[in-house]
Amino acid sequence: MKTFSAKRGWVLALCGGLILVASGSRHSGLIEMRRAEHLQAVSPEDTTPLVAITTVAFGGFRGLVADALWVRANKMQEEGQYFEMVQLAKWITQLEPRVPEVWSFQAWNLAYNISVLFPEFEDRWRWVNHGLDLLRKKGLTHNPNSPDLHWDIGWMFQHKIGMEFDLAHRLYKQKLMQQVMDILPDGRLPAESISPETAQALQETFSMDADFMRELDEKYGPLEWRLAQTHVLYWSSKGLPFSAKVFDDRRLRRMQMQSLAEQVRGGTIITTDDGLTTIRFPRLELFDQVIRDYETLIAEGPQNQYLELGYSNLLMDAVLLNAEYGNLETSYAYYEKMAAAEEEVPAGRENFKRYVFGELEREPETLSYDLAITRLVALLTRALDQPDPILASSFRQRARQIHQAYQESRSNAEHLARTGLPPLSTIETLVRKSRES
């Protein structure tokens, strides 16, 4: 009996050994399949030591350990223990580096939850930038084909840096500008070919591909890379080829078109000599290109209310911006296009006049920061272009009225600090500077 048991043990051990050898022989083939399907960007031998160790040590149990940590991390988030979550989230990313959600969770915690706990704006920026780097330099390294991570990066640029919801948004914009200017001194790609050194610096700092930047620049440029909105355009466009689901495709296209609309509204920037104040100027020449892009997308795809709403808003901008700059015939042509696309907009020149007058005479306190700046820049530009001193004076007077009413409408000191306008004299100085550049 003992002899039979011993023989059976040796047979089982031999079978087990053969199975291990056979499975090992399949390992390289599985790695190649992962690479072919873009399921793994970093081979096991090239990954970080901690990821390699946890992969070997935990094996198939990594998912169970990660799930337990996820439960604990969610509880910490509910309790507001954001700093404690940092190490926990780091462990989760090491256990599940190829799950995009873990990188999104960690980056959101850094850029949103933790950053706002600091009163000093410089400290806030470090956490926001850390969140971006986590997605760009680590998350995408393991998940290069993730539409979610591309969208997350674009959203941080669009919302956290590009908008005014964070009290420190002005500093974020300045920091981004300086990062770009350290590589591209004037904020734009060189007219000649991009040097290998510049391409490497763009990759190391922003994880951006210089060749793809050039493609976007040739289509919509010259693009101002110091603007957060241009980075939104890059990341949304870069993520689109990986959008296998309708949901991913729609939200990335919506982000892409929103960023292009922002290029039209303010795709050129002029900065004071001290770099503390920046004004965005519209690129009216870009309207036709972006309108065509919208029309192509709407015609090609299924009904999409977000794209249609964006298209409607862009046509409205085309009407009003051209009217503000005195391009009335161009404005009227866009109005007729808008009337043809929307049943509730009546066609005809008299209706056009009523519409434009009503919109341009809106109370200043109802304007957003960007609309107020746009209106002031247009009025001051027309004042400088106007040879008749009486008319020029009337444009400046209207600019003063809008500026004063807007500033007085800020509800409190925090609201004024976050959304208040630069002094009117500074805005006029920058308008003059834009004409010289």
Image (tube, grey):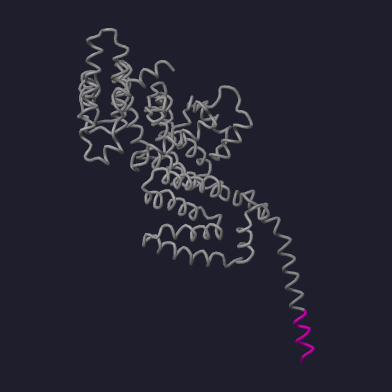
Q: Quadrant of residue 2?
A: bottom right
In this rendered view, identify the residue nearer to me: 146 or 244: 146
Can residue 18 be found in the magenta stretch?
Answer: no
In this rendered view, identify the residue nearer to me: 72 or 422: 422
Magenta residues, dominant SS class: helix
14 vs 366: above or below: below
158 vs 381: above or below: below
Q: Quadrant of residue 307?
A: top left
Can residue 9 be found in the magenta stretch?
Answer: yes
Residue 282 rendering spot, x and y as whole percentages:
37, 24
In this rendered view, identify the residue nearer to me: 343 or 156: 156
Magenta residues (range): 1-10
324 vs 174, left or right, is left
Q: Quadrant of the C terminus?
A: top left
The residue drawn where x is 75% and y is 76% is: 13
Q: Quadrant of residue 211?
A: top right
